[in-house]
């Protein structure tokens, strides 16, 4: 497989992931961003933990979808994330659920 073929494959996978996101975003009430992943979820709980002079976040999500192009099953019943980095949780307003038309043909 040439570098060009690999790049085309990755571009196609990203486009398919974006289209899947566009199709499922209306099913969820929250957006969760960590340093490694982007999630959609209907239930989110963030707990701040500390010990040994360090602070971390424990994020528990139920009924979630994971933005990960290489993951074969993106829907998960329950997910738990431990991170020492920032966590951003936003509740989606119904107006946020309208996907603008963009370069991927929304």
Image: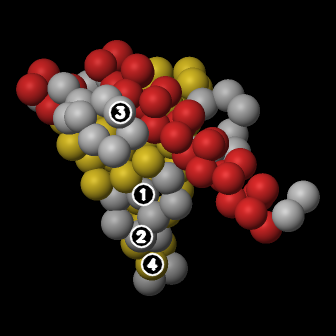
Mark 2 against mark 1, which lies toward the viewer? 1
Give the residue at mark 4.
54
Give the residue at mark 2.
85
Q: CA distance from mark 1 to mark 3?
A: 27 Å
Give the residue at mark 3.
105
- Residue density around tag 2, few if under 14, some if 14–19, many if 20 or more, within 10 Å: few
Compare marks 4 and 2 and give the one earlier in the sequence: 4
Residue 45 in the image: x percent, y percent? 34, 38
| Point 74% across, 63% down: residue | 4
For the rendered model, the colour scheme is secondary structure
For residue 44, side relative to residue 39 (left or right) = left
Quadrant location, the N terminus: bottom right
> Given contact means CB atoms under 8 Å apart, are the residues at marks 1 and 4 in contact?
no
Q: Is residue 15 visible?
A: yes
> Given contact means CB atoms under 8 Å apart, are the residues at marks 2 and 1 in contact?
yes
Residue 42 in the image: x percent, y percent? 34, 23
| Point 46% across, 30% down: residue | 19
- Residue density around tag 3, few if under 14, some if 14–19, many if 20 or more, within 10 Å: few
**Can you say whether 3 is above or below 44 in the image?**
below
Mark 4 against mark 2, which lies toward the viewer? 2
Q: Secondary structure at mark 2?
A: loop
Compare marks 1 and 4 and give the one earlier in the sequence: 1
Q: CA distance from mark 2 to mark 1?
A: 7 Å
Q: Residue most toward the right?
A: 1
For residue 23, side relative to residue 82 (left or right) = left
- 101 or 94, which is in the foreground? 101
């Amino acid at each position: 497989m040439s570098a060009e073929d690999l790049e085309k494959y990755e571009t196609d996978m990203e486009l398919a992931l974006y289209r899947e996101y566009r199709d499922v975003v209306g099913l969820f009430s929250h957006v969760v961003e960590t340093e490694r992943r982007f999630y959609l979820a209907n239930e989110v709980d963030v707990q701040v933990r500390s010990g040994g002079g360090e602070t971390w976040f424990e994020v528990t999500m139920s009924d979630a979808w994971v933005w990960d192009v290489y993951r074969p099953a993106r829907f998960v019943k329950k997910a738990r994330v431990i991170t020492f980095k920032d966590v951003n949780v936003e509740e989606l307003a119904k107006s946020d659920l309208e996907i603008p038309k963009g370069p991927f043909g929304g």
